[in-house]
Every structure is written in C-alpha cells, then in structure tokens.
Image (cartoon, rainbow, N blue to C red):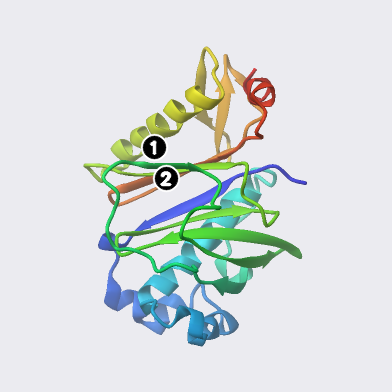
Amino acid sequence: MIISAGNDIVDLQAIDTARTKNPRFYTKFITGPETRLYSRPQLADMPFEHFVWLLWSVKESVYKFKQRHNPGLVFSPSKISVQCINSPSVSTSARLPEEPIEVKGFDKQIYYSGAIVFEQQELYFRSVVNNAYIASFVNNINSFENIYWGIKRIDHTGPDFQSAQVREFILKKLKQVAPADAIKIIKNSSGCPVLYNDMVEANLPISLAHHGHYVAYAFHLTNAPDAARHSIN
C-alpha cells in the first residue's frame, strides 16, 4: 500500500457563485458523467456550486496524494474521475464550531464519501461540507482510521499568513502525537511539503491546504506510539 496524504479546502465565502454555475467554468474540470452525479437523490439538498467545489477539492486532494510519489505529475483534473458520492447519514449543520477541528479518522463525523479513479487506480475520499467551507481528504484504501486532520479559521487571507498559519497548526499537532526535537516543513523541488527532523526527511507524509479564511492539514500516522516516534526519528 502506498502511504501518502492529500487534502484540500475551499472557503465558500471566497468563491464567485455565478461563475461557478457557468458551464464554461465547471466543464473545464468536471466531465459529463460526473455532472450527472448531481442528479442523484442523495445530493438533492446540495447547492450546485457546493457540488462543483466538492469535486474540485476531491480532485486537488488526489493530485496531492499522488504527487508525493510522482514529483513530475501534472494536475489534470478532467483525468481524475469521481465515480460516486455518498451523502452523510445525518443532516449537516451550518453552524461552525467555536474551536479548530482536530480529529483522527472519520468514524464519528458527518461527512460525504466516495470513490475516484485516476491512472487505473481506485482511491477514496471523505469530505466535510457546510455553508462555510468544503474540506476533502483522500486515501488509497477505504479506511481513514490512521488519518489525522484539522481545519481552522484564520484572521487574514494573505498567502504568507495562510502558509505560516497552516504550518504552525500541523506542527503543533505533530509535536503532540509524534514528539521530536527539531521538526520542520520544507517544500521539495516539486512544491510538495515534506516533514524533516534535523534535516533528515521523516517517513511521515503530510498535506497542507489553505483558501480564504481557512487552513487544513492531513497526515498519515499509524496507531502505535513507537511507530510514531520511528516515523519522525
């Protein structure tokens, strides 16, 4: 099994709703069969603009997941095929939590789920969808029990501020679950964030995302504390 991480987030207050609904826009990355997924009963309550950005966030997450092991990969969203979308069993709430969300797995969460095919490989996603943001997370097995993830609202939308905030967010969590003396995040030559400890690459895949007033992270870590320490050290 390939061990990787991929996530993406979309601030729904930062999108252009009219442009999103225009076929000249969304057909650049959503195919005909994918568009027809929207007509299925399980998505009846989802606004179309949310559907469009849900698919975008899933495809971006797939790209980040695969890029870690294929640095030369070019993002071609129309080649990433969303096969199905399953709605939550419990109605979603538009009310945002007061504190940042930081969770391991999705078993007790309200989420959308589904499958994707890319380069003849099947992958799976979980997505949190509400009126403020859409956040998606991808794995190559239909289990997310070893995926840690977090979502946080930030005060400013400048790129440097977003980047600094998401790194601070994930590093704080990593120091709790996989303690190490000198961990830092460095972008590799293809722009993928990589975790290092004392300038040695850690065997712990991470993924970062930011858009508008939201930042999000994901990383893959096994349950055992010894395995966590070994991943960093």
Q: How far from the left and from the top, in percent, is residue 231? A: 66, 25
Dot 1 falls on a residue whose secondary structure is helix
Q: Measure the C-alpha gap from mark 1 to mark 2.
A: 6 Å
Task: Identify which residue is drawn at 31% across, 62% down.
Answer: 12
Q: Are marks 1 and 2 in contact (CB under 8 Å)?
A: yes
User: Residue 107 versus residue 118: which sits nearer the camera?
Assistant: 107
Q: Which residue is mark 2?
A: 216
Quarter holding the C terminus is top right
Residue 116: name its quadrant: bottom right
Q: How far from the left and from the top, in percent, is residue 208? A: 47, 42
Task: Identify which residue is drawn at 33% across, 40% down.
Answer: 162
Q: Is residue 231 left or right of residue 28?
A: right
Task: Identify which residue is drawn at 22% across, 42% down.
Answer: 156
Q: Is residue 150 above or below residue 89?
A: above
Dot 2 falls on a residue whose secondary structure is strand
Task: Identify which residue is drawn at 44% across, 76% down.
Answer: 26
Amino acid residing under circle 1:
Val
Q: Is residue 138 left or right of residue 122?
A: left
* Mark 1 or mark 2, earlier in chain: 1
Q: How far from the left and from the top, in percent, is residue 151? A: 39, 45
Amino acid residing under circle 2:
Ala
Q: Is residue 220 above or below residue 124?
A: above
Q: Residues within 10 Å of mark 2 (few under 14, many from 20)?
A: many
Q: Which residue is mark 1?
A: 166
Residue 3: name its quadrant: top right
